[in-house]
Amino acid sequence: MSQLMNIPHLVADPRWRERNAGDWQGVEVSTLTGIEYDTWRQNTMADIPGGETFFDFQNRLTAALKDSLTWAQHWGPLIVVAHDGVQQVICRNLKLPYPYSPLCGPSIHSPRGEESPKLRR
């Protein structure tokens, strides 16, 4: 990607990974049921059984953002490739609209029942 974008420094920072889904990690979404899943669907800040708390997730991303912005001051352009949950937290921290901020999107998602991902803006 760094060659394609003509960016000389490529750094992979594991702090940008999506929230750990604990007991739900790797489980087909269509099979998730119960009050815990329903609660999380209504409020993605809710705890996930055996997973990373939203507080820890947000703190990890905030630290990554601060370090990345410091890095960008020295090295130049910054591109973060991340999942939707990461984008939501960063937009919230920067007080940017989500999902319609030019700094947080577009994102690719695959709605239930569709086999191919769709570009969402």
Image: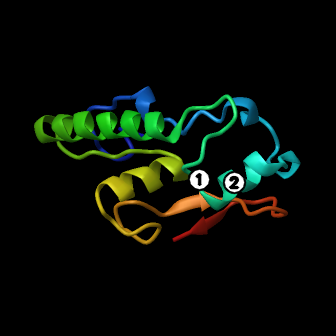
Give the mark, 1 or 2, whose residue is nearer the N terminus: 2
Res 51 → quadrant? top right
What colouring method underlies this structural image?
rainbow
Secondary structure found at label 2: helix
Quadrant placement of the N terminus: top left
Is there any visible trace of residue 28 in the rendered image?
yes
> For the view shown, which residue lies furthest in the right direction?
31
Q: Nearer the viewer, residue 12 or 37?
A: 37
Q: Mark 2 — residue?
A: 39
Most distant residue in the left direction: 74
Which is more toward the observer, 6 or 76? Answer: 76
When the figure is inspected, residue 14 is found, relative to residue 81, above or below; the finding is above
What residue is drawn where x is 59% and y is 33%?
Answer: 20
Which is nearer the eye, 35 or 59? 35
User: Horizontal and vertical percent for residue 68?
Assistant: 26, 37
Q: Position of residue 95 (x, y in %)?
A: 30, 62
Image coordinates for residue 98, horizontal then vertical, percent? 44, 67
Q: Which mark is residue 44?
A: 1
Kindly identify the residue that appears in the image at 29 percent across and 44 percent down: 6
Give how far apart the Cα atoms at labels 1 and 2 are: 8 Å
